[in-house]
Amino acid sequence: MRENLLRLWAGDAAAFAEDLLGLTLHPYQAKILRDSSKRVLVCGGRQVGKSLMAAVKSLHHALTHRDSTTLIIAPTHRQSRNLLSMVRRMVEAAAIRRSVRKITGVKVEFSNGSRVLALPSGRWGHGIRGYSADLVILDEAAFIPEEVITRAVLPMLSARDGACWMLSTPWDRRHFFYKAYSSRVWSVHRVPSYLNPMISREFLEEQKEMIGGERFRAEYLAEFVDDGGSYFPMTLLRRCLGDPQPMRGLTVGYDPGGRESYAAAVGVGERDGRIHVPWHIWERSGSYVKFDLRLLEEYRRWRFRKIIVDETGIGGPILEHLRGLGLPARGEILTEQRRGRILGNLKLLMERGLIILPDSPELLTSLNSIEYEATWRGTYRFSHRRGTYDDLAYALALAVWGLRRSGETILEPLQA
């Protein structure tokens, strides 16, 4: 494409998106894309088009700035590659495809010498050090370890006076994302999901009922929720995020839930000395027979090695039903003391960096919702914040407990 045509959109990424890419933007998207600040932060709810804005910004900057480097950085490689794939689809669908010199799964190079790269942040940012960038897009920035942002990302902008965009749903208030959100340095845009005219009020009311008020505030109202009393704070959970490897022969934890909660199952496996969490399911508690049959279907796919069932309360009949279906199930009665050991085992493994969690809002919120208080006996009493659900957290804790006690992992076993 001729450079004189691109100059028409050089200062207006929104017009570039609508006129050249053929996109229809919502008013808040156009406003954000026209933000010329060097530091832009988008604190957005679900389905407000954060990824679309990031992809447009990346593509617009690359085409209107010769010999520039744009980095798309996300907590995991899968997330950064997904955003780059959106850039690729925009290129291929528009008249600018002739401006592309090379496309791979992690990079798009343009004939003007510019490039867009997709990189995972990792735990320490080792894979992104050494780059100098004109623009950095941090996708799901609240889940990228703070030290990666402060020690690796921001320094790479200094030599070129580069720009940085951070986009994310909000989490806890101790992360750099919240500090930037509260500062005067960053140009901040808060975008609740209801600003998207395609999301109905009925859908939002349904989500509030399904996921609980606290998680709804974070994921749809784009509000920060304090996790000061959480047994699994977000600072810890963030360090465990990665790309869990899919594998067969999983050990599964199963929390049947109750009348006002969810039935949940989480599968874990061990590879290269670390515990991976590649699979989990959940649904509103109703007929446990229906959920057990769903578990049977998943067993045929994943070939679970064992299923550890919370036998407390209604767990007894469920355990018998699973065995009747031919599933390798055994029970675990969760007394208060046992509950503390199982959750403590999970937390210790997280602190040692031996668990790889998926970027699942449902699983992370369930873990983060668990609160604790010390008792006079020297133990902990556990609960969960009002409007949240802890079923996935207990299912994960049971799965890890079953794996660690099985003798089937090379990890040093913990005392029962």
Image (cartoon, rainbow, N blue to C red):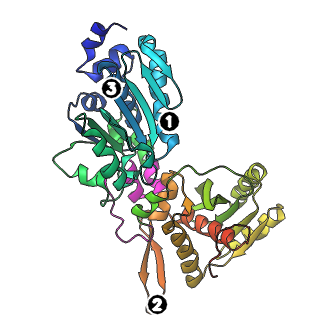
Q: Is residue 91 above or below residue 378?
A: above
Residue 133, numbered label: none
Q: Is residue 151 above or below residue 335?
A: above
Give the CA distance from mark 2 to mark 3: 59 Å
Residue 378, numbered label: 2
Q: Identify the secondary structure beneath mark 2.
A: loop
Which range of residues does the magenta coloring cover? Answer: 206-232
**Residue 152 at x, y percent in the picture:** 34, 48
**Residue picked out by circle 1:** 81
Viewer-proximal residue among 145 and 255: 145
> From this viewpoint, which residue is outermost toward the bottom?
377
* Mark in the foreground, 3 or 1: 3
Q: Amino acid at mark 3?
A: Ser
Instruction: Identify which residue is drawn at 52% across, 72% down.
Output: 348
Viewer-proximal residue among 241 and 375: 241
Viewer-proximal residue among 166 and 369: 166
Label 3 CA crowd tier, 10 Å (few <14, some 14–19, many 20+):
many
**Mark toward the start of the polypeptide (1 vs 2):** 1
**Residue 241 at x, y percent in the picture:** 49, 54
